[in-house]
């Protein structure tokens, strides 16, 4: 991940040096000044940070698929989900962290760690009995590994981490870049310099991405092949024949399983998960309110930004109200028709997605006319290590 980011950063700097069409206002800073930043520079910095956010969110589970395009679609959907609905990605990480901890606790005698829990949740453990494979996805399934019928019942944390495509140093550098971006946005506010809408949206994504490093620190990254446990059968000594076995057994997952994984299975989520999702949803919308009094290209765009930001805050409040009424025992007494209930259930989600798309469009079109101070750079931030 880091080499592509470094190359992209170099290309942005070259484009910035070649660009001479950043601002036309007479009051704008001199493009030849060392404290000047072009639109390309702003976009490049935000793009690098967004790539980090998306890369950090794309901790894919094992697909158990041989088709490369299905794997690509799945990982692309993870990235798109992180960009459009980052609150769902954050809550997915929180939920997996909790469940992985429970697995670690239940199998502490076997010296299992949270990494073992994550590997279980991402579909990393397969039980092979003859030519049949079965995915071990629950704690009850894992207990079968302790019944003495398994040839290779142990796997260490080191063996799991060796399968990961990431390491602590890479994650530390990514955290450094996100922290630098947040710091330079704060520095612009302190120095009374204009902050672009692209930076505000990237800031919101960066804030929501930082917890992912904590929740997914022990989760293996981009593992392609599961670990296979073999039962003591006559065929268990034939070697690893996983490449020749049809994955259409209980290992196979259809499109609906992947979608449920990406957006989190809300229907079966517990109250803690739902509450965390709603709080993060409100936080994400609230961060966009930072631009409430910013200078917009037009008054209409300012009102649209405000409306979309408030919608991101208001939509989850409808669910919170429903949770409060249910807690008080008042929800059933209302006797709401099914049609209205479905609208109340799915309407806020649709409103949230529409509001998010509006914000994405507004932040891009706003680049056509930036305030002069948006091109000024906080000089000391260039000395802070970043990509």
Image: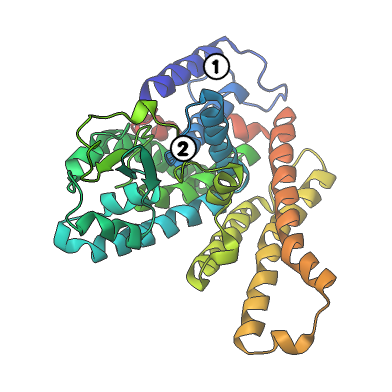
Which residue is under mark 2?
A: 63
Residue 60 position within the rendered picture, expressed as x and y whole percent measured from the top left: 45, 39
Please tell me which residue is depicted at 70% across the width and 52% down the height of the picture.
Answer: 293
Q: Between disc 1 and disc 2, whose residue precedes?
A: 1
Residue 21 position within the rendered picture, expressed as x and y whole percent measured from the top left: 67, 16
Quote the CA–CA distance across marks 1 and 2. 40 Å
Query: How would you rate the neighbour count of disc 2 (Cα within 10 Å): few for under 14, some for 14-19, many for 20 or more?
Result: many
Element type at mark 2 = loop
Q: Viewer-proximal residue, 311 or 96? A: 96
**Location of residue 274 (image quadrant):** bottom right
Which residue is under mark 1?
A: 16
Query: How would you rate the neighbour count of disc 1 (Cα within 10 Å): few for under 14, some for 14-19, many for 20 or more?
Result: many
Residue 258 appears in view: yes
The image quadrant where one finds the C terminus is top left
Q: Viewer-proximal residue, 172 or 271? A: 271
The image quadrant where one finds the N terminus is top left
Q: Which mark is residue 290?
A: none
Residue 254 position within the rendered picture, expressed as x and y whole percent measured from the top left: 57, 42
**Location of residue 30 (image quadrant):** top right
Q: Are marks 1 and 2 in contact (CB under 8 Å)?
A: no
Please tell me which residue is depicted at 42% across the width and 20% down the height of the picture.
Answer: 4
Q: Viewer-proximal residue, 192 or 365? A: 365
Q: Is residue 146 left or right of residue 225?
A: left
Please tell me which residue is depicted at 56% across the width and 58% down the height of the picture.
Answer: 265
Q: Residue pushed farthest top?
A: 18
Element type at mark 1 = helix
């Amino acid at each position: 991940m880091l080499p592509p980011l470094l190359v992209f950063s170099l290309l942005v700097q070259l484009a910035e040096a070649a660009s001479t069409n950043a601002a036309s206002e007479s009051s704008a800073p001199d493009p030849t000044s060392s404290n000047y930043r072009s639109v390309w520079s702003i976009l490049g910095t935000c793009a690098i940070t967004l790539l980090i956010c998306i890369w950090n969110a794309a901790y894919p589970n094992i697909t158990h698929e041989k088709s490369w395009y299905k794997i690509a679609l799945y990982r692309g959907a993870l990235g798109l989900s992180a960009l459009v609905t980052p609150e769902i990605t954050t809550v997915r990480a929180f939920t997996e962290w909790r469940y992985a901890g429970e697995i670690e606790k239940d199998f502490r005698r076997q010296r299992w760690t949270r990494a073992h829990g994550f590997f279980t949740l991402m579909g990393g453990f397969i039980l092979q009995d003859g030519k049949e494979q079965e995915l071990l996805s629950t704690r009850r399934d894992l207990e079968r590994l302790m019944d003495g019928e398994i040839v290779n019942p142990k796997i260490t944390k080191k063996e799991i981490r060796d399968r990961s495509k990431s390491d602590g140093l890479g994650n530390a550098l990514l955290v450094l870049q996100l922290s630098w971006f947040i710091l330079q946005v704060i520095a612009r506010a302190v120095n009374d310099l204009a902050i672009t809408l692209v930076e505000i949206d990237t800031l919101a994504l960066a804030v929501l991405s930082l917890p992912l490093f904590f929740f997914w620190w022990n989760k293996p990254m981009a593992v392609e092949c599961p670990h296979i446990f073999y039962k003591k059968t006559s065929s268990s000594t034939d070697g690893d024949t996983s490449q020749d076995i049809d994955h259409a057994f209980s290992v196979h997952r259809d499109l609906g399983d992947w979608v449920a994984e990406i957006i989190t299975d809300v229907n079966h989520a517990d109250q803690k998960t739902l509450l965390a999702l709603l709080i993060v949803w409100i936080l994400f919308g609230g961060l966009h309110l930072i631009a409430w009094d910013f200078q917009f290209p037009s008054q209409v765009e300012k009102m649209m930004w405000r409306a979309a930001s408030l919608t991101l805050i208001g939509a989850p409040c409808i669910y919170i109200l429903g949770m409060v009424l249910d807690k008080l025992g008042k929800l059933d007494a209302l006797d709401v028709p099914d049609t209205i209930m479905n609208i109340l259930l799915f309407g806020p989600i649709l409103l949230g997605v529409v509001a998010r798309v509006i914000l994405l469009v507004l932040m891009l079109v706003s680049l056509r006319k930036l305030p002069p101070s948006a091109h000024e750079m906080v000089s000391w931030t260039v000395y802070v290590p970043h990509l």
